[in-house]
Amino acid sequence: MKICLRLAAVPFLAVVCFQGSACGGVHHQAFENSALQEQRSAAPPRVQALTVPKGYELSAQKKAEALAYSHIQYVLYFSGVVLVLLIYSFLWRAKIALAFRNWARHLSSRHFVQCLVFAPLFFFTVRLLLFPFVYYSDFIIEHRFGLMTQGVGLWMADWGKDLVLFLVAGTLMVAIFYWVVRCSPHRWWFYFWVATIPITLFVIFIEPFVVEPLFYKFTPLDATHPALVTRIELMLHRADLEIPRQRILEMDASSKTNTLNAYVSGLGASKRVVVWDTTLEKMTEDETLLVLGHEAGHYVLDHILKEFALIELVMLAFIALGFVSVRKLIRQYGPRMGLEGEGDLASLPVILLVLTLLTFFSSPLVNGISRYYEHQADQFGLEVNYGVVPDPNAAEALAFQILGEQDLADPGPNPFIVFWLYSHPPIDQRIQFALNYKPWEEGKPLEFVHSAKF
């Protein structure tokens, strides 16, 4: 249940700082063996009732697994940031970036051609150095906890597609960045920020059609669950949100993962709602409606555009601070390292080193605002499904319980971890809110759904 910004969240930072792909990195993907696939495809959606939880409740064994998995993820996050910083520092201090620049200059005197040579070499080297870490975190760990069953060959195929997207996007952004720097040596930080705005909007628009189909298969949900789609349309009508039936989609997540999710993506004509088939299998229609009501809330409450605006403002601050920091670093260390200024292609690891640090320390701010938006979407899901689902409170609480248990969510995250890393409220808090938010029983008006259209 996440806002699907992925690469769209600031192309330059998302592409070159975090080494993420145009679709958010190699997903938790899993191809099961044929017997397991047949067994899963034959499994009907869950229809039996479960006991409504009083909070996020796990068995002793499942709790131990969730704690172990989540704690490993925390360690991997912080160690991953350190590793990226070390790689950028190594490419700078070992003069590897300088060697790539010299080779690019040897091949052509045209700066654009030099970018086409330098950027793929640089980013491929970064991804190659990161590969053992990515393989361990995205493949080994996911297998260890039963969240992935994909073979190494198919995982490598996805990694390869991810790499190609990354190299294309990264090269484009580097070419634009250094062109702006060379055109305006003193105000490049502002003009480059302006350039990222239409690029980011364009990426958000095309991602559903260009990027996502490279990794997953999408089919109209109407083809497999027409009754559910009819109920979804009723819910969307209450939200004053018009999404054609053919853009309410089912994604074949079960071919690659055992986890659950749903999301919204796109803008304008590319706007769509996607629910994973694993979610449809594990949840009842009522619970699925609460999940999709949450996703509808992101559109109705303009969370995608608000988060886009927030990230652009944060990026403006990053680039301004980065401009000052990079200029000082290059003035102090540039001559001995062979750098000719921030317009030199070999300065890229220095720039990325600074921006990665700034991005890391901005995480609490960005994630804090994201948690607020996610809480609003939880509330919207309850309000918009009141009158559509018999008991929206129980349905949403059960949906969160199933989501947390299936995805091995931490049952008791440390407050610092929540502050720094969590883009969503902890599962237990979401369940408690789902159970207790009942303005209709107290005679209070709904905050987000002001009309009752049936």
Image (spheres, rainbow, N blue to C red):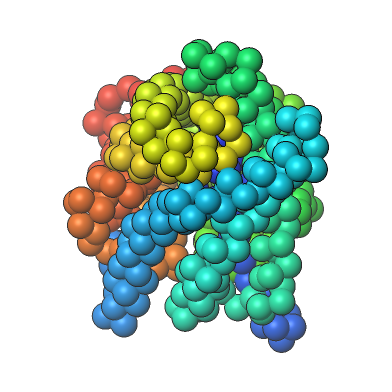
Q: Which of 24 and 431 is in front in this view?
A: 24
Question: Who's the residue at 66% across and 27% down the image?
Answer: 176
Q: Where is residue 337 in the image (x, y as percent from the top left)?
A: 47, 43
Q: Is residue 60 visible?
A: yes
Q: Which of 111 and 362 is in front in this view?
A: 111
Q: Nearer the viewer, residue 135 or 391?
A: 135
Relative side of 246 to 362, left or right: right
Tell me the quarter of the image containing the C terminus: top right
Question: Who's the residue at 19% across and 51% down the image?
Answer: 415
Relative side of 136 to 344, left or right: left
Question: Who's the residue at 48% across and 48% down the image?
Answer: 92
Relative side of 403 to 101, left or right: left
Q: Quadrant of residue 239?
A: top right
Q: Where is residue 447 in the image (x, y as percent from the top left)?
A: 36, 23
Q: Position of residue 153 (x, y in %)?
A: 71, 77
124 shown above or below 141: above
